[in-house]
Image (spheres, rainbow, N blue to C red):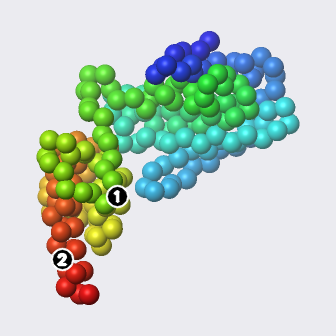
Amino acid sequence: MSIKLHGKEYVEVKDRVAEAHAEDSFSMLSEETFSMGGREYVRVFIDVKGKQYIGTAECKFNANPKTPDGMSPFECGETSALGRALGFAGYGAVESIASADEVVRNQEPAQQPKPVLQTVPAQPQAQDAQSEEVPVPSKLRAMFVSIGTTLETAEKLTFKVVKNDLELTPEECFNLHQVYDSWKKRFDEKQQKAS
């Protein structure tokens, strides 16, 4: 059975597993965990009808503690990784390799809607405050690196604490973007004097 989310059809992992078990063609070979970019992942290896498939998903250890990811981050990551591997093998892949479970777990909690964050161009141009777009933390990180510093340094000086990227609010990102603009101006002035 599929579920319609954001206009696309997705199948739950439990249905992908049931479909594979019904054909008696699926076995779990192994799994592994690894870190990349400060995030934790789980990867599962399965065998389906003599062919091997791999699925990878993030273990969201910093998720809201009231969500399934917050209560059981490894298990949720493992389930998503298995669902992806089965999707690659052709089980339950209606319109996407992602399962319904994976799409739902990546949505914001309903009780705390947040505005959608948008990125700014790599070289921000002067815009009036009304139309300025708020960059996401990963974009902010790249912007600060481009001027020889880090997002963490800006957070420490601005908020007196370094936050997890997922905890930064749009207002805080906007403030950090203003800090970047100020620092970038000084950085450009120093570069110009040096040349």
Q: Which mark is residue 189?
A: 2
The amino acid sitting under disc 1 is Ala
**Which residue occupies the extreme top position in the image?**
1
Who is closer to the viewer here, 14 or 147?
A: 147
Quadrant of the drawing holding the N terminus: top right
Residue drawn 25% across and 27% down? 112
Residue drawn 30% across and 40% down? 117
Q: Residue 80 carries which label?
A: none
Q: Is residue 91 above or below residue 81?
A: above
Numbered disc 2: secondary structure: helix
Residue 9 appears left or right of 166: right
Q: Can residue 172 be seen in this view?
A: no
Could you tell me if the residues under marks 1 and 2 are in contact, i.e. CB atoms within 8 Å? no
Who is closer to the viewer here, 33 or 133?
A: 133
Question: Would you call the spot at circle 2 few (<14 residues within 10 Å), some (14-19), or many (20 or more)?
Answer: few
Q: Residue 122 carries which label?
A: 1
Quadrant of the drawing holding the C terminus: bottom left
Q: Can residue 178 be seen in this view?
A: yes
Residue drawn 31% across and 22% down? 110
Q: Looking at the picture, how far across and down is residue 98, in whole percent?
A: 57, 31
Question: Would you call the spot at circle 1 few (<14 residues within 10 Å), some (14-19), or many (20 or more)?
Answer: few
Residue 99 appears left or right of 165: right
The amino acid sitting under disc 2 is Glu
Q: Disc 1 and disc 2: Cα gap in Å? A: 19 Å
Residue drawn 27% across and 57% down? 124
- Corner quadrant of residue 194: bottom left
